[in-house]
Amino acid sequence: MLAPDRRHTKDPLSTIRMEPTGRFFERGTDGTEVELGVVRVYSPPHRLVLDWYPGTGPEMPTQVEIVLSPAGEGTRVVLTHGPGPLSLGVYPKRASAYDRSWELVFASWVEAATETAG
């Protein structure tokens, strides 16, 4: 489970949701919603591309691509986060913060997967 400081609603029990319309958001247990971006490509089970709002907002979204592939008995996850067309000037200033944040997210995913497998 992600810590509350990794949640945009500050609710450790919030859920991340994607709708068929492309809406991508977080919903807290109290109903609070935070827009996280827009789904641009959804090709299950291998690829997801998002316009990413955290850190820049909808005016200058960055782009996140997640690619999943088989790796032995598990799954390899490759996440690429870079500038979108409207965030070329802003992304370099925020890249190190994004890197630190993704390291925390991946660590929580590994912890959750280990707990599930154990």
Image: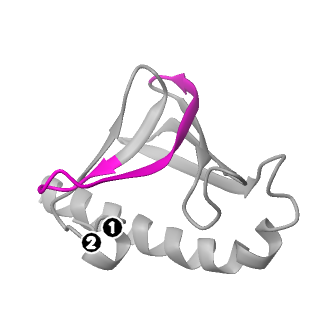
Q: Dot 1, crowdedness within 10 Å: few (<14), some or many (≥20)?
A: some
Say what amino acid the circle numbered 2 marks: Lys
Q: Nearer the viewer, residue 45 or 65?
A: 65
Residue 3 location in percent, x, y? 26, 75
- The residue lying at 49 percent from left, 27 percent from top is 22
Q: In the rendered view, would you say 36 is above or below 111?
A: above
Position of residue 14 in the picture relative to residue 78 (left or right): left
Position of residue 89 in the picture relative to residue 8 (left or right): right
Residue 42 location in percent, x, y? 53, 25
Q: In the rendered view, would you say 29 is above or below 89?
A: above
Q: Which residues are magenta?
A: 26-44
- The residue lying at 16 percent from left, 54 percent from top is 117
The total of numbered circles placed on residues is 2
Q: In the rendered view, would you say 96 is above or below 28?
A: below
Q: Dot 2, crowdedness within 10 Å: few (<14), some or many (≥20)?
A: few
Q: Are marks 2 and 1 in contact (CB under 8 Å)?
A: yes
Residue 83 location in percent, x, y? 78, 55
Dominant secondary structure of the residues highlighted in magenta in the image: strand
The secondary structure type at the circle numbered 1 is loop
Residue 113 location in percent, x, y? 25, 56
Position of residue 27 in the picture relative to residue 37 (left or right): left
Question: Which quadrant of the figure contains the N terminus?
Answer: bottom left
Q: Nearer the viewer, residue 84 or 105?
A: 84
Say what amino acid the circle numbered 1 marks: Arg
Q: Is residue 33 magenta?
A: yes
Residue 10 circle label: 2
- The residue lying at 61 percent from left, 58 percent from top is 57
Residue 7 circle label: 1
Q: Nearer the viewer, residue 95 or 76?
A: 95
Q: In the rendered view, would you say 34 is above or below 1?
A: above
- CA–CA distance between discs 2 and 1? 5 Å
Rendering quarter of residue 51 = top right
